[in-house]
Image: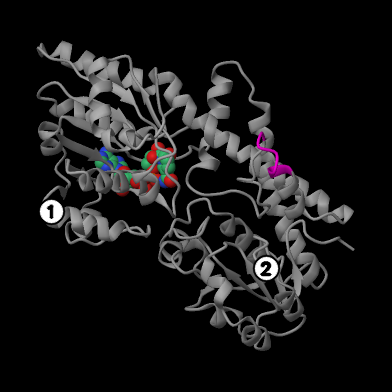
Amino acid sequence: MNIGIMGTGYVGLVHGAVLSSYGFNVTCMDVDEHKIKQLAAGISPIYEPGLEQLIQRGIESGTLSFTSNAQQVVQTSDVIFIAVGTPSKKDGSADLSYVRSVVQTISNHLNGYKVVVCKSTLPIGSSSRIAEQLNGALQASGASFRVDVASNPEFLRQGQAVSDALSPSRIVIGTNSDAAKQMLQRIYATQIERKVPVLYTNAETAEMVKYAANSFLAVKISFINELALLAEKVGANIDDIAEGMGLDSRISPHFLQAGPGYGGSCFPKDTEAVVDIGKRNGEDLLVVQAAIQANKKQKQKMITKIASRLSFNGKLRGRTVAVWGLSFKPDTDDIRDAPSRDIIQGLVDLGATVKVYCPQGMRQARRLWSELNGAIHYCDSEAESAANADAIVLMTEWAQFRNVDLAAIASNMRGNRAMFDLRNMFAMNTDVQQLFSYYGVGTYSEP
Ligand code: NAD
């Protein structure tokens, strides 16, 4: 079976590389020619553990190739996955311009029956509309064939995308077409044999499962973050509260880690998009709206927390803050909508000198945060960023931060040597807490 993947970002590239490792002939297509050149040379343009090796193995074995020639991919593929981005528009709705463009490209080049699979997160009803558009054009051109369109949302987690794609938590297949269903069963045969749960449903339900899952996780994060703010006020410990809650199997301990607010390329945009879809359908999704509001408040609260401990008269002029971790979570270079961005902006606005270090996010930050380039200093290590700083703000729980020589780092800092551990990474470590004026999230009593 020949598989074409349109869009080689975090989802398309990982999916394509994993399918090629199962022996399918996979061609990944992208409009970004620089990316395609890098990929064809076996270089991954993004950081995901194990991804570059998988790409190289696919190229060597001849099952994985890269192109910017859309016509070739459409015409030689039996199944075409759409995996382009669906970012937020200013009004919160999903920007479908990349999807429209790719669907038009597919439409222009169709030469026989194919299954088109929507892997991008798409507003509910999109897959059916794509089917209408493609088959409408085929009918108008007098073609003797049609295409099937299925929704097959992606649930991989960045930072562990390859292992998630190899062993997904579930596979959701949304289509009313038996042919499309069978094709997807063949594609996922390895995972199905390994007893990965599969949900067969219609396209609308599949599309909504994705929004429901991401919104629910965002709600869970905002819930624990809000309780963390209260815990600080009343002398309770949010990590113990989360543990006490999570021991109830109806609640589960996952996604109950208090922090600086959720971010990344999915939760912020998908929560906004589902609220927009609700409004368009006359349903106010109040719980999701509250999660979005609470998330904005959380980031602001973190800025206030830092400022209130470091400031002169509410300003941070003359203060130097080291920020550790820019990516929205560990083991990824993705900084899209990362909470670090808002918190750094808040510190810069208050006049702080900000020095940043991230194991993988620096290249993307330099590229995507160009408006901050004059205002922040990029450093090559934790130690360089913290030298002569008044405070460290630990934004992302990269495992390597546990192994740095914090005593040496603290000795090169100045003032009260504050550590704002926004991931509670050292909340149980009294040695670390003695080196710094230590502030976690929801783990100590506010004076
Ligand atoms: P991305 O921005 O990393 O990648 C999108 C790619 O599509 C880019 O390389 C871009 O150049 C390419 N592209 C744009 N227009 C194109 C066109 N007309 N033809 C071919 N390629 C084109 O996006 P992503 O993070 O991989 O997300 C893709 C989709 O998957 C989104 O809808 C997202 O919500 C969803 N999703 C993402 C994740 C995640 O963790 N990133 C997880 C699940 C679902």
Residue 403, compared with residue 210, is above or below; it is: below
Q: Residue at x 59, y 34 (%)?
A: 216
The magenta stretch spans which residues? 245-250
What residue type is disc 1 on?
A: Ser
Residue at x 27%, y 27% (from the top left corner): 185
Residue tagged by mark 1?
Answer: 61
Q: Which residue is mark 2?
A: 426
134 with respect to 295 (left or right): left
Question: Where residue 259 sits in the image (x, y, percent)?
Answer: 66, 54
Residue at disc 1, secondary structure:
helix
Measured as percent of width and height from the top left, residue 28 is found at 21, 45
- Mark 2: which secondary structure? loop
Of residues 429 and 10, which is closer to you in this image?
429
Query: Is residue 327 toward the left or the right of residue 56 in the image?
Result: right
Circle 1 residues within 10 Å: few <14, some 14–19, many ≥20: few
Nearer the observer, 85 or 91: 85
Q: Residues within 10 Å of mark 2 (few under 14, many from 20)?
A: many
Is 272 rendered above or below residue 60?
above
Q: Is residue 246 magenta?
A: yes
Magenta residues, dominant SS class: loop
Residue depicted at x 15% and y 49%: 65
Residue 11 position (above or below residue 106)? below
Percent of width and height locating residue 367 = 41, 62
